[in-house]
Amino acid sequence: MDTLEHYLTAEDADPIDIVETLASHHAWDFDRVADNQIAMGIEGSWQTYSLSLAWSPHDETLRLVCTFELDVPAERRPAVLEVIDGANDTLWSGSFTTWPEHNMIVFRYGLNLAGDASASGTQIDDMIAAAIEACERYYPAFQISLEDGACPQQALGIAMSQAYGRA
């Protein structure tokens, strides 16, 4: 087992330390904001996503928030909320919401580690991957809803579904 795998499987590892190790390993831009918080930029197909992960020992939860550049004008907000509801209906983990005060759509995910449970590097890596995959999948739906004024059903129709099997 190499040093990275050993560190990522250590039961007493701090979740934010694990995130920092993963960010270094993947060569993602990151900034350790505080002992319990890290911010990263991850390049996607549509744009660079800004992720913030914060550990709350009190709640025993690792919280991920992923934001991206996509302004939500007030007049399009009801339609975008319908697209968000439709997207959330298909997600098993995490959810989209809006932050009206910042005029943006965000993806949120919480990993509860109650009872002194520890997170593995694989769990945290999967958590980050799930956030990016959800944003990549639904970004075009949000964009067409905002910019082209497509109805929510049309916008959701362009969201790519996960493919299973192989050709």
Image (cartoon, grey):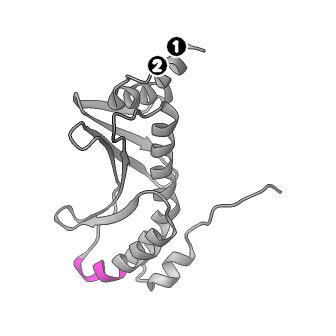
Quadrant including the C terminus: bottom right
Q: Quadrant of residue 5?
A: top right
Tell whether 75 sits left or right of 166.
Answer: left
Q: CA distance from mark 1 to mark 2?
A: 6 Å
The residue type indicated by label 2 comes to Tyr
Residue 118: x and y, percent?
A: 40, 32
The residue type indicated by label 1 comes to Thr
How many neighbours does mark 1 have within 10 angstroms: few (below 14), some (14-19), or many (20 or more)?
few
Predominant secondary structure in magenta? Answer: helix
Say what secondary structure mark 2 lies in: helix
Based on the picture, tell me whether residue 78 belongs to the magenta stretch.
Answer: yes
Q: Which residues are magenta?
A: 74-79
Residue 95: x and y, percent?
A: 39, 62
For residue 3, which numbered disc appears in the image?
1
Based on the picture, tell me whether residue 20 belongs to the magenta stretch.
Answer: no
**Residues at circles 1 and 2 in contact by the CB criterion of under 8 Å:** yes
Residue 121: x and y, percent?
A: 48, 31
Tell whether 55 sits left or right of 48.
Answer: left
Residue positioned 29% across, 78% down in the render:
77
Please say if 51 is above or below 94.
above
Q: Is residue 147 visible?
A: no
How many neighbours does mark 2 have within 10 angstroms: few (below 14), some (14-19), or many (20 or more)?
some
Residue under numbered circle 2: 7
Furthest-front residue in this view: 115
